[in-house]
Amino acid sequence: MSQNPETIKDLIGVGFGPSNLALAIALEELAQSKGHALDALFIDKQQDYRWHGDTLATQSELQISFLKDLVSLRNPTSPYSFVNYLHQKQRLADFINLGTFYPCRLEYNDYLRWAAEHFATQAVYGEEVLRIEPEVHSGRVEHLRLISRDAQGREHSRRTRSVVIGSGGTPKIPEKFTAFKNDPRVFHHSRYLSGLAKLPCTEGKPMRIAVIGSGQSAAEAFIDLNDSFPSVKVDMILRATALKPADDSPFVNEIFAPDFTDLVFNEPAEQRSKLIGEYHNTNYSVVDLDLIDRIYGILYRQKVAHQFRHNVLCRRDVEAVVATRDGLELTLRDLATGQQQTHRYDAVILATGYERRSHRDLLAPLQGYLDDFSADRNYRVLASPDLQASVYLQGFCETTHGLSDTLLSVLPARAAEIGQALYNDLARQHASQPALAALSRA
């Protein structure tokens, strides 16, 4: 295991997706106002910068305004804004001519990569952080040790005074499909492009594919398979009675404003849960209305032409899955009638969402110091006084901070709040360690 025991970072960020990239920008701004920069490093398991890179189908569009980029809501004059990205790429006038607030995800991915390139010296790619361990001295934890593993299987050890975990969601695999994790015919939507690349349809061969799910990812997969693979027949299978539209109306969208985070956080736990439930249809198991219209139009034209290529099977629960040489047999139960039917597919795409639990695995060695992984208003994990090193969460605080926590909307505000809190934490740590404080002044 490689390590440099003499080096102690001020901050190590786990993951370098939009959340920690926004933090890197905020820390750069704070360094100017504070007069000194934090020694920060960000570790990402991908080999290069990609944001949902394996899901970037050609028709996939961002679902929020480009103005909710990494920085504009906090500092619209920042050089890291999406508008400046367009200007630097000489596409600003062309984008204006599109007349839209919603860039395609392919372009937004390129924007994030462009921003990340400015922090190349602070980023390490191709390493997966395995765990975060305490370094205990005289009963106190002043430093943390991060253990990561690179693509060659080598483990690396790094020390830090604080950690910000922004590792994102983990693909949610329904129990009926867990036995097929090594079957190339079954894959989660997070591996959409690489999964499809292994299927015969890429060579124009006929296939029947099931898409499991009722949200935006499932709908985008349906449309992409329809448009890009004429030899493919698709069944979209969902438990709901219908594809439901995402509510992105103006008054409802106010729940994603940074100020709404204060309202949610200050409510009692029961009221918070009620608020999240009330607005669940803004983010979960819903589809953009334009996409719903497209899917309905495709099915309608099939009826006109009497050429039935695709289906949307509502109210269906997957009762059993059997793999054979000839395909995957899914037994579906109609939730309204109770009737069962078995369908055979050549592949199954699981557009079944994500879980937000990776922080618990990473922080398991610190569990004895933590208050059930809950966080304060500034996203710092609540802990016993013995844990002097600070741990922050990005994207794991929905139950306390609201539905915007896993989305792009609050990135600029949250990054500034965490950045300011990190400076305060490190100042307290230095004050409590005279030797370090003297070294800092030297």
Image (cartoon, grey):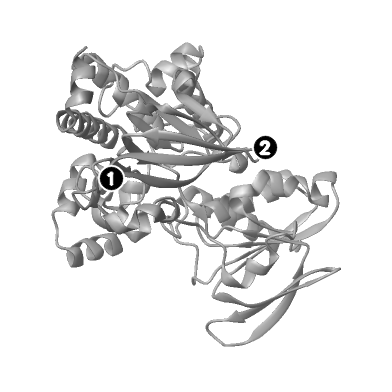
Q: Disc 2 vs disc 1: which is toward the camera?
A: 2
Q: Are marks 2 and 1 in contact (CB under 8 Å)?
A: no
Residue 303 at x, y = what percent? 69, 63
**Quarter occupied by residue 277:** bottom left
Provide the secondary structure element on which disc 2 rests: loop
Q: Nearer the viewer, residue 394 or 386?
A: 386
Q: Which quarter of the figure is the C terminus placed in?
A: top left
Q: Nearer the viewer, residue 275 or 296?
A: 275
Q: Can see residue 398?
A: yes
Q: Can see residue 70?
A: no
Q: Residue furthest bottom?
A: 338
Q: Is residue 365 above or below residue 14?
A: below
Q: Residue furthest front?
A: 138
Disc 1: which residue = 256
Residue 403 at x, y = what percent? 31, 52
Q: Which quarter of the figure is the N terminus placed in?
A: top right
Please give the label number shown on residue 152. 2
Q: Which residue: 45% across, 57% down?
A: 286
How would you rate the neighbour count of disc 1 (Cα within 10 Å): few for under 14, some for 14-19, many for 20 or more?
some
Residue 66 at x, y = what percent? 39, 31
Q: Earlier in the sequence, mark 2 or mark 1?
A: 2
Q: Is residue 299 above or below residue 86?
A: below
Q: Nearer the viewer, residue 63 or 327?
A: 327
Q: Is residue 177 above or below residue 260?
A: below
Provide the secondary structure element on which disc 1 rests: helix
| Amino acid type indicated by mark 1 | Phe
- Side (left or right) of 177 relative to 216: right
| Amino acid type indicated by mark 2 | Gln
Q: Which residue: 29% across, 33% down?
A: 415
- Side (left or right) of 65 relative to 294: left
Residue 346 at x, y = what percent? 78, 62
